[in-house]
Image: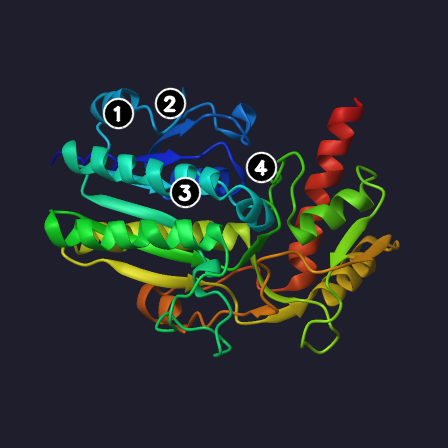
Amino acid sequence: MAIESKRSVLVTGGAGYIGSHAVLALIDAGYAVSVIDDLSTGFRSSVPAQCPFYHADIADRAMIDRIIADEKIDAIMHFAGSIIVPESVVDPLKYYDNNTAKSRGLIESAVRNGVRHFVFSSTAAVYGEPAVTPIHEQVETKPINPYGASKLMTEWMLRDTATAHSFNYAVLRYFNVAGADPLGRTGQSTAGATHLIKVASEVVAGKRDGIAVFGTDYPTRDGTAIRDYIHVSDLADAHVLALGALFADPAASILFNCGYGNGFSVTEVLDAVEQVAEQSVNRRLEGRRPGDPPALVADSSAIRATLGWTPRHDDLPTIVAHALAWERQTAARDAA
């Protein structure tokens, strides 16, 4: 009896933070993985040697056509894009180009080349400032910044494409992603990162002299913004499960939140970093950043019930410990 060949997945942005963790999870699950990344924020060293790697922009349609043909791509997992909320406010056209226009071209390439399955990296920023907490998937989408709007537009394009073509998709709306691979294979290495746990871990590792706390007057329990922090490896597992669901039912598309349902304030997170690191973190209190809502906490009951997603790292000190381990590992490597 012939053994069925591996499903082949193209991961865009697979040299980046979340993308590189998804690549590892896909390999662990038995998929054949190819990566395209322009390395504007990603790192070639984050891509396993066994993966065919293409240093290119996803806007290069000829390259996308070539990869799909050469690697016999069955599905696309799309992470490439820009993710910094304040930057999107001051440079919206960059976000509508990177996150919306380039995604449109990628979706068109998928349809043109007969790739029927598409997993999209979306964001809780599509909800804006929802009146409901925790946030479920039926909450109205009203983004308050160009980052969220640019991602929502891609969700719409996927929805309409699935209606018109033999094509299905999974949209995963992330809350705040943090941590690093527990085995130390990859982590967040982006220069000038703005993620809270990442920045605080850099302070502990001696890479920064302090961290800014943006806003202490939010209507929250301690005045600082509240977010739902999800470990990046649990998020990667969610992508693998979502992809499996697309293959299992080619007529169905899915949309899920990815978070734990636990909200921590900026102050609480920094306190946790200090406790895990056993040292203080220098904090600078500053005003609110434009485009930041007071609180975003997920209702993730749908993905748990439908896909059987069971997080392995739903614990703030564990998330912090893995992030700190990565920063210390990279600091030691850079010093060698």
Q: Return the x and y of residue 107 as percentages of the image width and height.
A: 25, 40
Number of numbered discs on residues: 4
Q: Earlier in the sequence, mark 4 or mark 1?
A: 1
For the residues carrying marks 1 and 3, which lies nearer the camera in this image? 3
Residue type, mark 4 in image: Thr
Q: Left or right? Give the position of 180 relative to 237.
A: right
The residue depicted at 30 percent of the width and 21 percent of the height is 63
Q: Left or right? Give the position of 9 relative to 199.
A: left
Mark 1 closeness class: few <14, some 14–19, many ≥20 residues within 10 Å: some
**184 relative to 283, above or below:** above
Q: Earlier in the sequence, mark 2 or mark 3?
A: 2
Between the C-alphas of marks 4 and 1, the distance is 24 Å
For the residues carrying marks 2 and 3, which lies nearer the camera in this image? 3
Most foreground residue, 282 or 44: 282
Residue underneath mark 2:
52
Asked if the residue under mark 1 is in contact with the one under mark 4, i.e. CB atoms within 8 Å, the reply is no
Residue 250 seen from this side: no
Mark 2 closeness class: few <14, some 14–19, many ≥20 residues within 10 Å: some
Q: Return the x and y of residue 203 as percentages of the image width and height.
A: 80, 45
Residue type, mark 2 in image: Pro
Between the C-alphas of marks 3 and 4, the distance is 29 Å
Asked if the residue under mark 1 is in contact with the one under mark 2, i.e. CB atoms within 8 Å, the reply is yes
